[in-house]
Amino acid sequence: MQLLRQVSQFTLLAGSAILVVGAAHAAGTDAGTSVENTFTLDYAVAGVSQGTITNDPAYTQEPGDPEPVIDANGPTDFTVDRLIDISVTADNSGLQVPPNAQDRILQFTVTNLGNDHQSYSFSLADVTGDDFDATGLELTYSRTAVDLNGDGDTADACETAIVDAPLTQTLLGDSAGNASYTCDIPTDLPFTVNVSGDIPDSLSESGTDNLVLVVETRNPTAWAFESVSPAAGAVTAQDGDGSNTIDGTAENFFADGAGTSEEVASDGLMSAQSSFIVTSPDLTAEKLVWVLNSESDSVSCAGEPVPASEPTDQYPTPGACVLYSIIVTNTGEVAGSNADGIDIADILPEGVSFVSAVTSGFTTAGTLTSTKSDGTTDCDGASGETCTVSVTGASLEATAGPTDSEAQLYIRALVR
């Protein structure tokens, strides 16, 4: 009978139970957690119950039951290994920038998809064959405050909120593995990485600078569950013996994919590409003067419509109504190539008397004023002074494709 019991211990796993110690996240159970498994086997011989076979050292038989047979090896168990996985996303890929812009930011979101705290370092790769290179590139990262050790506060090292934390400037061409790395990043908590750059002047519209952010996995200051601290900041290495040690210290298993050609799957790195794209409004302006009516006054001149073409049968004699047209054209072909802060100042000579002014076609009309040289705003020409007609703070956006955007400032005046 004892022989039957011993055979049953090692061949039958009915009635098993699993004990998991440690927290579970979206990425799974914490690395270093021991998962224990016990079982019980009950049986009878000729209708007589025999002692329970189990590997649970804490098992206690019910009153009157035979003595259990407890496996001295105890529960089966294994240690959850460390999953190394990262997500990197370009949040504003294809950022439109004007020439000569300073400190324009490409933002990336990085998420630790593994099952342990990690730290990260960053490098930049400039994609060959693009149109220009931004200058003064700098990297910063930020994340919210988090209670890493579960003590109810965020007062410990690496727990406080990190906002725009500077990293050592990473020059183009540096390889992954630079010496500057983040504080500890828990699982499932996205954080941002900003790449700030300056845009050169005199660039063609739609010119592109493609940049790849490469994120490399580093050791944190402390693991989430294992008590033995790693070498903080060291590049996290994948288990290299090619064999799983089922119980003991957590081994590192790389499960990252490949984001760009700057890295490969299962290498502890992940990357994403983003781009600066030049939007360069190309403004032209011209001024025309037409005679609308050879004989007019201020009331009728103000009501004169803008004809489709220049009248050729009217003459600029005293009392004639003339129309000044300042035509502004945005020839940019990319939507978003907006010209902002347009200011126009037109000084009417003493030979004419101001009647009225109006704008048309601006995306933002801006502020239209007419002011005499002495600062007053009647501009009636009675004193023979000049009058300045101004538009300030206007804008004119580009129209995608070959169609140009056009706006006008119309000024009506009487010849003295």
Image: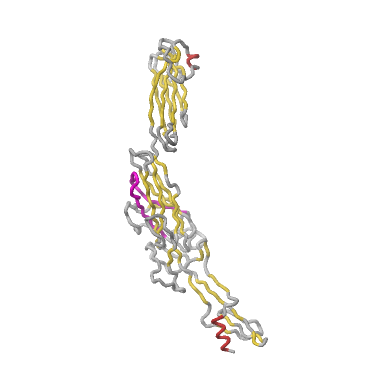
Scheme by which the image is coloured: secondary structure
User: Is residue 362 visible to us here?
Assistant: yes
Residue that lies at the very extreme toward the right in this rendered image: 47
Residue 257: percent from left, percent from top: 43, 59
Q: Measuring 33% from the left and 44% from the top, which residue is drawn there?
A: 132
Q: Measuring 41% from the left and 13% from the top, which residue is drawn there?
A: 415
Q: Measuring 32% from the left and 53% from the top, which residue is drawn there?
A: 173
| Numbered label tally | 0
Q: Is residue 332 left or right of residue 60?
A: left
Residue 4: percent from left, percent from top: 58, 87
Q: Quadrant of residue 335?
A: top left
Confirm whether the magenta stretch covers residue 89: no
Which range of residues does the magenta coloring cover?
Answer: 119-143
Q: Main secondary structure of the magenta part?
A: strand
User: Is residue 373 visible to us here?
Assistant: no
Quadrant occupied by the N terminus: bottom right
Q: Measuring 32% from the left and 51% from the top, which residue is drawn there?
A: 172
In the depicted structure, whether residue 241 falls above or below residue 406: below
Quadrant occupied by the C terminus: top left
Residue 348: percent from left, percent from top: 39, 18
In the depicted structure, whether residue 354 falls above or below residue 396: above
Residue 230: percent from left, percent from top: 40, 66
Q: Quadrant of residue 65?
A: bottom right
414 and 152: which is toward the camera: 414
44 and 54: which is toward the camera: 44
Confirm whether the magenta stretch covers residue 125: yes
Residue that lies at the very extreme toward the front in this rendered image: 402
In the depicted structure, whether residue 61 falls above or below residue 338: below
